[in-house]
Image: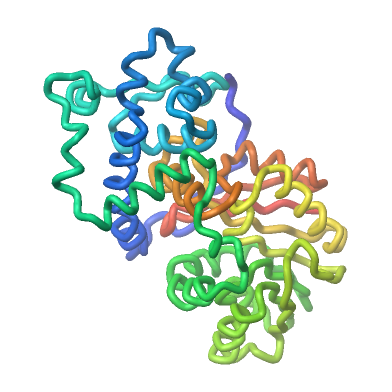
Amino acid sequence: MSALPQPVTPAIGAQPEVSPLFFFNQINAYQQTATLMAALQLDVFTKLAEAASPEERTAQALARRIQASEKGTRVLCDFLTIHGLLLKHDAAGPYAWYQPTQEASVYLDRRSPRSLAAAPKFIAPPPMHGAAEVVAASVRKGGTVTEEYTNENAGMWVDFARGMAPFTGASASAIASLVDGPGPRKILDIAASHGAFGIACLKRNPQAKVVALDGATVLEVGAENAQQAGVAERWSKLPGDAFQADLGKDYDAVLVTNFLHHFTPEICEQFLRRLHAALKPGGKVAVLEFVPNDDRVTPPVPASFALIMLMGTVEGDAYTYRQLNAMLENAGFRGTQRHDVAATQQTILVATK
């Protein structure tokens, strides 16, 4: 399969002095243990070893054998591939299939005389068993089993806005530079959270104004940050549901940061059409996401994000450039440009109405 041409600019901050990725990787390190335990619980390694052909080792075929969702099985197997327990063949193709590594065949196949498949029962602490149950349940269901994640006014999102701003906002100055323009600018900040992205635009352009959309309780955090940054008079709140609220019109730019990964491609495309209608002709949309390659197992950090989305959203995923570009084009945008942010390994896509 030929790769989709990807307009790429040099990585923004290609050699950062410091990066928050060490924290992101360390805080999520438990996922490796929990996912291995879930895979053993679902008997993934044994079922793959028993399969007689590549056709029986696809995510679709394996999902039937372990009685789980196809999406959940794909995300689980990709995560196991990223961490060296499975091999993924024809990775970017429509019929990718998986095979246990030599170590997994010897130690994780329950039929092996050297199998360690039962060992987690004795050596993993009780909280880790609970985490593994959540992973396994999410794989079976194909989405989150925790309803709190789906409520935009839940207390956890206020905690997110206060606690994750140094990581999620690390791309703010880059986005501000990419959507900036001369003179007065009207900018819509979708799922504004801590407000860092809109605030960066206001600090860059003293004639800009930002409308920040999010849940009412979360927007209070953004309002505090706008006040501290000295831009509160140009930062306004739009409380509500991004799919239902009256967005207004004639925006010069719309910021869509860490938002599309919560929904299906179809819903994302419909939402991007709403944004297209809200923009002026020539207006820009900036999308910030973790973007894995077509093989979905590289680079490790963006590819691993699919597991977070499996456990934390009803239907979300980590989308490839190919998928995101298709969403934008189908919504009426053109000229998508890709900008990789080295500090967070996220990607900014900028397209024009």
265 in relation to 258, above or below: above
Q: Is residue 136 left or right of residue 198?
A: left
The answer to whether residue 203 shows anywhere in this view is no
Tell me the quarter of the image containing the N terminus.
Answer: top right
247 in relation to 267, above or below: below
Q: Is residue 184 left or right of residue 346?
A: right
The answer to whether residue 75 shows anywhere in this view is yes
Q: Position of residue 83 (x, y in %)?
A: 31, 38
Q: Residue at 40%, 24% (x, y): give it.
A: 88
Q: Position of residue 188 (x, y in %)?
A: 73, 70
Q: Quadrant of residue 50?
A: top left
Q: Is residue 127 left or right of residue 340?
A: left
For the image, the number of numbered tags is 0
Q: Residue at 63%, 88% (x, y): give it.
A: 231
Q: Is residue 219 left or right of residue 127?
A: right
Q: Residue at 56%, 72% (x, y): give it.
A: 154
Q: Residue at 63%, 80% (x, y): give it.
A: 219
Q: Position of residue 131 (x, y in %)?
A: 34, 53
